Every structure is written in C-alpha cells, then in structure tokens.
Image (tube, rainbow, N blue to C red):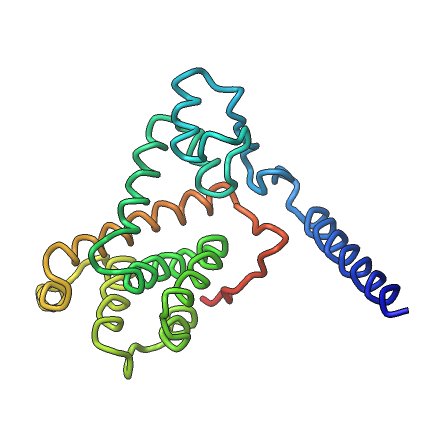
Amino acid sequence: MKKIIKYLLILIATKATILSAQTAQMSLPPDIDPESLSRLPLILKDSLDEEGQRIFEVINGPDTNEPRIGPPNNSMYSLEPSEPYDVMNQLLRRASVGRQIFEISTLVPAREFNQQYEWTAHEIGALNAGVDQEIIDVIKYKRSVEGLPEREAAVIEYGRALLQGDHQVSSDMFANMVELFGRQGTIEITMIMGDYTMTAMLLNAVNQQLPPDRQPMLPMLE
C-alpha cells in the first residue's frame, strides 16, 4: 500500500511539473520562441560554418548542438563579438574583488534594468557566495544603504551613481572606492557592472523569459 501511495505521489508531482511547464509555454508573448524563450530562435551548431561552430563550442562546450538559452544564444546572433563577450564575462567572474563583490556588482545593473532573468540567476549566486539577504534586499527594493557594511554599501552607491541620473561619479566617491578596493578592484567592479548592463540590455531587447523552473524574484518597482 505504501508503495502504491508513493507511486501516486510521484505521478501527481510529475504531472504537476508538466502542467506548470505547459502553462508557462501557453502564457508566452506571441513573439517569443518556445524553445529559446526569447524573440530569437535557438542557433544550432550544425547550422553554422566551421568558424561559427568553433565559436559556438567556446561558448557552449563541444558536446551539444543546442546553445544555452539566455545571453549565449542571443549574443551568437552577432557571432564574432559573442566570443570575446563570453570570454570577458568568464574572466570577470575570477576578478580579484572576490565572488561576493562580483555578485553584488551584477545585481545593481540587473535591478536598474528590471531584468528578471539576470536577477534570478544572480540573487541565487549571491546567496551561494555568502552575501546576506539584507544586502540583496537593499538592491532589490532600492533601499538606503545606511547600516550596511562599508564595502558593500560603497559598491551599491557607486553602481547607482553610474546607472542613474547624470551617470557620473564624484571625485570623493571614486577615491573612496580606490581606498577600499584598490585601482584594479575599482576598475574590475566598473567592468562587471558594464558587462551586466550590456547583458541586461540584450535580455530586455529580446524579452528573455524565465525557464519553467525559475520563479520571478524581482518586484517591478518604479
């Protein structure tokens, strides 16, 4: 009897997952491809010439014909720039500022561009890196940085200065960043934010949808 109940529960859960995925597919905007979940269909490796296939493998690995959805597939519509774009992203992930500051630096532009796909990936990444939920929520809900640790508060305010208003950073703010992170670290943080600003713009342009296993995490505040 217990085995039967267990089997029925598994069956119900499986059907619920399938129905959830089907519902998500049915609710897609009319210009969204159901496989790529964006306005651009998947670029298959075997549809590319030899050089294109080499670039495809750099970005997606050699053992698949289908690209990863999100930035990899969408960026490959401009093949030559897509390779250094991906390489730069991988290099920035190993920046000297460390994983926590890296993740905070991705969340600021994701919030400023209301980019759900980018945010959902990097809120989880930030938590896994050990960033406190309080810090994440300051970015998510556009709260004051008052009371946050100095380094984290400085990064958030620096990103907001670059992405809001006149997009300028004062001499004092820049000097404070250099004091906290050094010249190299300050430029790394700037490049991370620039990289994820570009990615947010790309994903917004193609209206990248979340896969069925991801729930929206970003409230759409003004």
Residue 155: image location, x then y, percent: 24, 66
- Residue drawn at 77 percent across, 53 percent down: 19
Q: Position of residue 35 (x, y in %)?
A: 62, 38
Establish if 162 lies above or below 152. Answer: above
Q: Is residue 186 left or right of residue 17?
A: left
Among the 4 quarters of the image, the one containing residue 36: top right
As drawn, the residue found furthest toward the top would be: 49
Closest to the observer, 67 or 199: 67
Q: Quadrant of the N terminus?
A: bottom right
The residue furthest right is 1
**Quadrant of the rendering where the C terminus is positioned:** bottom left
| Residue situated in front as seen by the camera: 163 or 215 | 215
Up-down relation of residue 162 to residue 45 (above or below): below
- Name the residue: 49% across, 64% down: 218
Residue 216 appears in which quarter of the rendering?
Answer: bottom right
Residue 66 is situated, as x and y percent measured from the top left of the image, at: 55, 32
In the orientation shown, which residue stands out farthest toward the bottom?
A: 147
Question: Is 107 left or right of 153, judged from the image as shown?
Answer: right
Quadrant in which residue 109 is drawn: bottom left
Image coordinates of residue 150 in percent, x first then y, are 21, 76
Residue drawn at point x = 31 percent, y = 64 percent? 100
Specify whether 75 is left or right of 92.
Answer: right
